[in-house]
Image: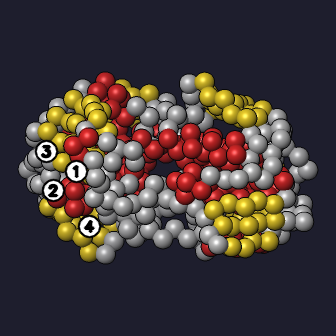
Amino acid sequence: MNVFQISGGRQLVGTVDVGGSKNTALAIMSAVVLAPGKTVLTNVPNLSDTRIKANLLERFGAHVVWDGNTLEIDCSEMYQGEADEESVRAIRTSFYLLGPLMARIGHVTLPAPGGCKIGARPVDFHIKGLRALGADVALNGGEYVVSTKGLRGAEIYLDFPSAGATQHLMSTAVLAQGVTIIKNAAIEPEVTALASFLNRMGARVEGAGTSTITIMGVEKLNACEFRIPADRMQAGTYLLAGAITGGDVTVRGILPEEQTAVVNKLREAGADVDEGPDWVRASVSKRLKGINVKTMPHPGFPTDMQQPMAAVLCLAEGTSVVEETIYESRIGHIQELNRMGANIRSQGRTAMIEGVNGLRGAIVEASDLRAGAALVLAGLAAKGETTVKNIHFIDRGYEAFEKTLAELGAKIQRVHAPDLDGSMSNVDSE
């Protein structure tokens, strides 16, 4: 087992060049199958998730070549391959291949998706939308079987503005005959980035970034080149890492407006935050104060930042209340933070955090990606040594996490610790 070993108590100071967005890359990697030819994606985060997705594409006929953070995907010949069940269940976005592959080759069979067990995350919105577009969808023995004799435009209303469903249905509809309108669509930046990619290929998508997206179907798409934009969750995590250590961290290469919710909460807690055209700087010179945080769809406070923010608030003066409204089970960090000396009580989806004067190092275990990030942040601020287990979760969302933190002044290393084999967690991958 590989673990992170952290010697806490060091201020983080410096600048981070933020890498490409994992969630955007995964959505675009589903959409590349729509166009024959070689698509070149740059600034792709080289993570376990993106590597798994690339391997899955190869199962359906794509030819994939990695070169650092550049990914070439040749989809000249796509076919119904035999999907690796372990890979499909490892990442939830594997499910987003259903619609685009069906639009390209007419029929697809895929095992049901997996994902971090942070909530129910049903696929009902996806299925309802695919059927509205003219797909036949069946669940047989744990596998989804979809086919179509021809996709047609439709008006689709999402009961919840799901980013995943919006991306999936938008990608599927670009080759449908006629006009598709998605109402109550997600307005996340990742949706806007996917629309830009689709339009680069020749699609006609309008309204991305608003709650109503209109797609005029086209007959064919063309391969293209596209740069993956910066990862706003990665940027937020490094800002919070600076804050929890009383440091001074600048994240660069981002759109500051994508950090508005995190920045506003940092300011409310007492951090000093400056912004430029493509950077945000957060510094903390005095103890932060407790605040209330409620996760919401974009532009609200992102659910992916809830757990790292909770770690920061463990050391804030007074009481903080953190309410999770998106995923009902995103609480895997609470017990582990309490193991480090935090004072957190949970009631349903709400965590009440009484700020403490300090955290202490401990052996803790990540239960999902963002819980793992929260535990690393806590370890950076804790007195003594912290060991974080199950770091394969963290590797799914942060490329060279320990290297970047070390460059900011953290004392953290990845080590092999066979004596710690035997996880307490049975949580699946995100």
| Mark 1, secondary structure of its residue | strand
| Proximity of marks 4 and 3: CB atoms separated by less than 8 Å | no
Q: Name the residue that disc number 3 marks.
A: 361
Say which label, 4 or 3, has the lower sequence index: 4
Residues at badges 3 and 2 in contact (C-beta under 8 Å)? no
Q: Residue 404: which quarter of the image?
A: top left
Counting residues from the start of the chain, the first of labels 2 and 1 encountered is 2
Answer with left or right where residue 133 lies relative to residue 236: right
Q: Nearer the viewer, residue 162 or 316?
A: 162
x 69%, y 30%: residue: 72
- 261 and 19: which one is in front? 19
Q: Quadrant of the N terminus?
A: top left
Name the residue at 34% across, 27% down: 403
Viewer-side residue, 176 vs 355? 176
Badge 4: residue crowd in 10 Å (few <14, some 14–19, many ≥20): some
Disc 4 marks which amino acid? Ala
Labels 3 & 1 near each other (Cβ < 8 A): no
| Mark 2 or mark 4, whichever is nearer to me | 2
Residue 69: quarter of image: top right
Residue at which label 2 appears: 339
In this view of the protein, can residue 394 be seen by the observer?
yes
Residue under pointer 1: 364
Indicate the amino acid at tag 1: Val
Mark 2 burial class by Cα count in 10 Å: few <14, some 14-19, many 20+:
some
State if disc 1 and disc 2 touch (CB < 8 Å): yes
Residue depicted at x 47% and y 55% = 430
The residue that appears at 36% across and 61% down in the rendered structure is 426
Q: Residue extending furthest left?
A: 357
Query: Which of labels 1 and 4 is toward the front?
Result: 1
